[in-house]
Image (tube, rainbow, N blue to C red):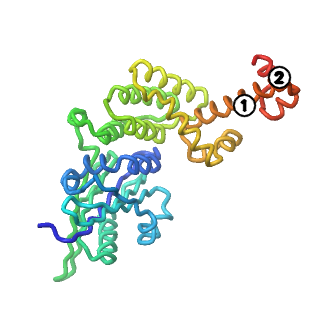
């Protein structure tokens, strides 16, 4: 019988090679939390009442682990959930993404466990998800002993390198797609050209996957966060290819509405113009940059057309829209 428990689930995700996946994991975890628990923690999933809202307690986690803010490669989540039996539970997901192995990994897991236990005085459920390929330092327990005093702390682990792609393909959970993607990238040589072809292949699989709109959008963003195309022309070419895929599969995802959402969000944060002027992405992916640029160009053209209708001089239109005289004459 379940008693009052706190389930701080400590999730440790390790980054492979030098591909930055911290923002990707943050984004997809926040958007597909239920699917994450279902895929990685099915036993816990059966206990949670997802008909009730869960709460991401980021500030509470930062207060408990202030050192996590100083680590660029960490993704921390504290989530409050309700169980089906009506009891309140807390789930702590601590995701640490880094590009190297850590021989003190198990000890660090225990340190987080002890701090959480000291704060909440409740039992803890933990999981470690390893995404790097090497079979080193993938511990599932921490032990310490001195004379007659002994500590043993065990936790669940999930090792991507040990997973079978054929078995993963049987799952319709979007995190199966994430795991398969990272496995395929183990021996991957990153370049704009390679990223273009790999992302094109992954995008094609997405549109035929049967995932719902939200899942496709989150997975699409995950791909773009991880496999960035820095070349502007190649990025634009990828974007056009994706549009064609959407039309061929006759989906309504088409990314048209999504394009607008991405652009509007960027506009609200005053990122588009600054990103285009400085060529700094301000956290935007290559796909977002293409969308942002297209949105800005479209707005400039619309403004120029209205100014022409009002018989404004060409010099003034050039000044306010940034279009060239030749571009204006074509309108």
Q: Earlier in the sequence, mark 2 or mark 1?
A: 1
In the image, is 204 to the left or to the right of 281? left
Q: Quadrant of residue 108?
A: bottom left
Task: Look at discs 2 and 1 and give the one toward the viewer.
Answer: 1
User: Cα distance, mark 2 to mark 1?
Assistant: 13 Å
Front one among 88 and 32: 88
- Relative to 320, say whether 310 is above or below: above
Assess disc 1: are there few (<14), some (14-19) or many (≥20) residues with their C-alpha within 10 Å of its C-alpha: some
Can you say which quadrant of the picture contains the C terminus?
A: top right
Q: Which residue is mark 2?
A: 325
Using the image, tell me which numbered label, if any, was put on residue 300. Answer: 1
The percent coordinates of residue 250 (x first, y second) are 40, 20
Q: Residue furthest front?
A: 310
The percent coordinates of residue 124 (x first, y second) are 25, 67
Residue 186 seen in the figure: no
Using the image, tell me which numbered label, if any, was put on residue 166. Answer: none
- Secondary structure beneath dot 1 equals helix
The percent coordinates of residue 299 (x first, y second) are 69, 32
**Residue sitting at x 24%, y 33%:** 169
Residue 239 seen in the figure: yes
**Residue sitting at x 42%, y 54%:** 98
Front one among 268 and 189: 268
The percent coordinates of residue 152 (x first, y second) are 20, 71
Q: Quadrant of residue 65?
A: bottom left
- Relative to 60, say whether 39 is above or below: above
Front one among 237 and 145: 237
């Amino acid at each position: 019988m379940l008693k009052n428990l706190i389930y701080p689930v400590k999730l440790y995700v390790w980054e492979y090679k030098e591909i930055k996946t911290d923002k990707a994991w943050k984004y997809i975890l926040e958007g597909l939390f239920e699917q994450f628990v279902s895929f990685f923690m099915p036993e816990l999933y059966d206990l949670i009442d997802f008909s009730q809202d869960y709460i991401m307690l980021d500030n509470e986690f930062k207060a408990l682990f202030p050192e996590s803010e100083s680590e660029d490669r960490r993704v921390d989540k504290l989530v409050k959930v309700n169980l089906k039996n009506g009891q309140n539970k807390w789930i702590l997901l601590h995701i640490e993404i880094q590009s190297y192995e850590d021989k003190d990994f198990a000890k660090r897991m225990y340190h987080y466990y002890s701090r959480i236990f000291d704060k909440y005085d409740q039992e803890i459920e933990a999981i470690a998800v390893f995404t790097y390929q090497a079979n080193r330092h993938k511990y599932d327990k921490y032990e310490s002993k001195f004379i007659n005093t002994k500590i043993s702390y065990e936790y669940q682990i999930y090792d991507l390198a040990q997973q079978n792609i054929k078995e993963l393909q049987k799952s319709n959970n979007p995190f199966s797609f994430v795991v398969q993607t990272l496995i395929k990238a183990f021996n991957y040589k990153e370049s704009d050209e390679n990223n273009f072809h790999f992302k094109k292949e992954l995008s094609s699989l997405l549109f035929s996957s049967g995932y719902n709109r939200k899942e496709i959008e989150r997975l699409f963003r995950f791909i773009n966060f991880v496999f960035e195309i820095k070349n502007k022309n190649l990025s634009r070419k990828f974007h056009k290819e994706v549009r064609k895929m959407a039309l061929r599969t006759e989906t309504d995802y088409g990314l048209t509405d999504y394009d607008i959402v991405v652009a509007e969000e960027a506009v609200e944060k005053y990122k588009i113009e600054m990103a285009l002027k400085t060529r700094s992405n301000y956290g935007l992916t290559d796909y977002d940059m293409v969308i942002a640029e297209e949105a800005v160009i479209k707005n400039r053209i619309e403004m120029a057309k209205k100014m022409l209708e009002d018989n404004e001089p060409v010099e003034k239109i050039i000044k306010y829209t940034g279009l060239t005289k030749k571009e204006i004459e074509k309108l």
